[in-house]
Image (cartoon, rainbow, N blue to C red):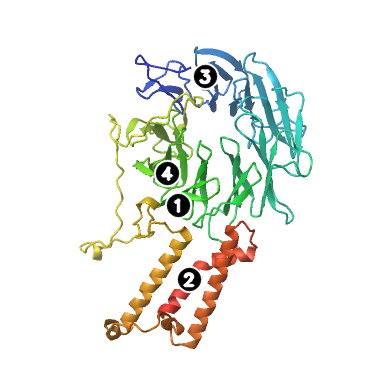
Amino acid sequence: FFPTNNCGSFYFTSLVRGSEGLYMVNGPPHFTESTVFPRESGKNCKVYTFSKDGTLFAWGNGEKVNIISVTNKGLLHSFDLPKAVCLEFSPKNTVLATWQPYTTSKDGTAGIPNLQLYDVKTGTCLKSFIQKKMQNWCPSWSEDETLCARNVNNEVHFFENNNFNTIANKLHLQKINDFVLSPGPQPYKVAVYVPGSKGAPSFVRLYQYPNFAGPHAALANKSFFKADKVTMLWNKKATAVLVIASTDVDKTGASYYGEQTLHYIATNGESAVVQLPKNGPIYDVVWNSSSTEFCAVYGFMPAKATIFNLKCDPVFDFGTGPRNAAYYSPHGHILVLAGFGNLRGQMEVWDVKNYKLISKPVASDSTYFAWCPDGEHILTATCAPRLRVNNGYKIWHYTGSILHKYDVPSNAELWQVSWQPFLDGIFPAKTITYQAVPSEVPNEEPKVATAYRPPALRNKPITNSKLHEEEPPQNMKPQSGNDKPLSKTALKNQRKHEAKKAAKQEARSDKSPDLALTPAPQSTPRNTVSQSISGDPEIDKKIKNLKKKLKAIEQLKEQAATGKQLEKNQLEKIQKETALLQELEDLELGI
């Protein structure tokens, strides 16, 4: 089903759920309430979902779960499920999965099954399961629905051809916490995560269905410490998995968000730790739809964003900025870097083929972001309960123009909004434009709050001082005379060396201005100055020891870059590098 207007161009549909009810909105290009789905008034709608191709729509209104065909506007089925809070269609629209909170009776007897699988064609219940936790409640299907899998008591149960009465295969490992089926066609692969216990490391393993038996059955294995939970991300071609391993608590006290590490595992057995140049949390990691590169947003604010290739080498560095999320367009040719949640909502829209900045719109207070299936339009929203004021949504063109805006009345709330999905390949990728498209909606530039200035300084000139010095993208940095670009480590060391050199010269000129004006004789060797830096043997001894420690840290970092697992005390040494460098600089300057 492809909604079109009289001119033959596509209409897109957005679903809106809130205290004003549940309804559909057409657009772009024209924004009107859809007649496909009559507005469901009231505040009882708890959940809705589209099928993967957007032709079916299901919702729960607090009394029943209904399914309609968006194509012919007809009601297909209605199920008596007043407590349903989760709905999901299988990839080919064969099955509707529903989940209700699990309850037990007062006498302690087991509750009734709360996960139901319904045949969409006939409306009959194919199977019911007990699923106590809401997390990972929905079974996982392969894209052709040949395979369906559930995690049950440390086992992954596999069903074939939607026959849920017979378990076709089992993958049993001690304490399986999570699994993810690979996308795409056969052969099917599965990534499983087992948390560590009693000093043993956590690990992620990749298997090819149905080869689970034997010690060498796994396609790849990656073990690691410091993992209370993991997020596993398959690329579209199912050739590799990115694993974000995170702990709930950072024992060093450096981060409120715990510690995160990023690992790469390929189905050919290769694995690596992705080396991130800046310390701090990993906010987001996302694959490009080409499956050949991924983008990571990481590091203490202002955060860095970098694109890596399949060798985990950095391809392009976007520098630093107020961002905590990354979103590739459906075609993979545009990347949006954004700062939502506790950030101001600044977005950077990049052409990732030419690494050129397209626009920098600001979507203040946004809690939700989604690309339209056409790869041209963007939906941002401010939803409750994350924020209960200024609720509403905006539809943008990627060039920064606001095409449609809706603000919810002050006494109402917006709970959910989303695009109607379409299958991949329906919309061809269009040539990227850098000129903002015309719009009738005024683009409200948010007022930048000026910094507080005490009365004594208000009539004096403003000095430009920043709390954080932001780093520009790598193609906007001033180029040196060398044609061959230096590596990131070499650039970092070069900057440190130049800063130290300048500081030494400045300190020397302050102490002996007369000597600073006298040119040094050319016959003087360069290294004679470093023989006795301070003239104080105790200080020289301290400097020598600090340099020794820093050299050891550099060796540890090189070992970590090759993939070697470092001990806890070695990692603690690396974390002290900044403090040691500062101490060394203070001693050399005589502070």
User: For the residue marked with disc 4, what is the amino acid?
Assistant: Ala
Q: Secondary structure at mark 4?
A: strand
Q: Position of residue 396 (x, y in %)?
A: 36, 33
- Mark pair 1, 2: CA separation: 22 Å
Sequence-wise first label, 1 or 3: 3
Q: Residues within 10 Å of mark 4 (few under 14, many from 20)?
A: many
Residue at the right extreme, as displayed: 214
Which numbered dot is residue 338?
4
**Within the image, what quadrant is residue 125 found in?**
top right
Label 3 sits on residue: 55
Give the mark nearest the N terminus, 4 or 2: 4
Q: Which of the pair 238/384 is nearer the observer?
A: 238
Q: Secondary structure at mark 3?
A: loop
Q: Are the residues tagged 4 and 2 within 8 Å (C-beta)? A: no
Q: Is residue 233 visible?
A: yes
Marks 2 and 3, the one that precedes in the sequence: 3
Give the mark nearer the N terminus: 1 vs 2: 1
Q: Are marks 1 and 2 in contact (CB under 8 Å)?
A: no
Residue 370 position, x and y percent, is 45, 34
- What residue appears at the point 76 percent right and 23 percent down from the top-left corner? 165
Q: Amino acid at mark 2?
A: Leu
Q: Are marks 4 and 1 in contact (CB under 8 Å)?
A: no
Q: Of the numbered discs in the image, which one, if any, rests on residue 304?
A: 1
Q: Residues within 10 Å of mark 1 (few under 14, many from 20)?
A: many
Where residue 382 is drawn, which disc sits there?
none
Could you tell me the amino acid type at mark 1? Lys
Instruction: Identify residue for label 2.
Output: 581
Q: Is there any visible trace of residue 591 in the rendered image?
A: no
For badge 3, the amino acid type reads Thr
Question: In the figure, 373 relative to 580: above or below?
Answer: above
